[in-house]
Image: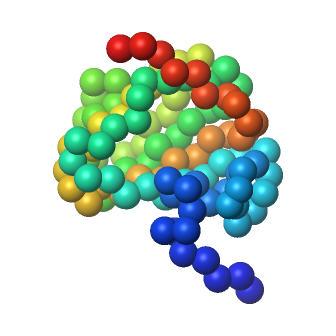
Amino acid sequence: MKRAHLDDMTRGWLVGDFSPSLCRTSEVEVAVQRRQKGERDPRHYHKIATELVVVVTGRVAMNGEVFGPGEIAVAEPGEPMDLLALEDGTATVCVKVPGPRGDKYLLEG
């Protein structure tokens, strides 16, 4: 059995085709991310991947909608999304399927 710590992963990303990774694969990417109020992910989209964001604790705003614990946002390929943490201690799980390298396209604004 391996033992690891989330703090050793880059921005919480623990599964995917990158390093460090606990399971190196291009089939999926998984992250557990902790955020403080005001932290954000820039507006972006994926050409190939579907991105799912599960709110575990706290609240986030995505595409102008507020999501709380247990709620899930799903962005299909080509659909822009952004994320803003609305509370300290917000935690999310992010899953991208598939997880090809370079499939993140930033948008202005």
Rendered image quadrant of residue 57: bottom left
Please name the residue shown 61% across and 77% down the image: 4
Q: Residue furthest top?
A: 108
The percent coordinates of residue 3 (x first, y second) are: 64, 82
Q: Is 11 displayed left or right of 58 in the figure?
A: right
Above or below, 42 against 99 in this view is above
Q: Quadrant of the C terminus?
A: top left
Image side of residue 46 versus residue 87, left or right? right
- Residue 94 placement, left or right of 34: right
Residue 49 pos. (x, y %): 67, 31
**Residue at point 52% right, 21% down?**
106
Nearer to the camera, 31 or 71 = 31
What residue is rendered at 41% in x and 29% in y?
42
Q: Position of residue 90 (x, y in %)?
A: 29, 55
The answer to which quarter of the image holds residue 58 is bottom left
Residue 30 lies, with reference to residue 2, above or below; the image says above
Q: Is residue 57 visible?
A: yes
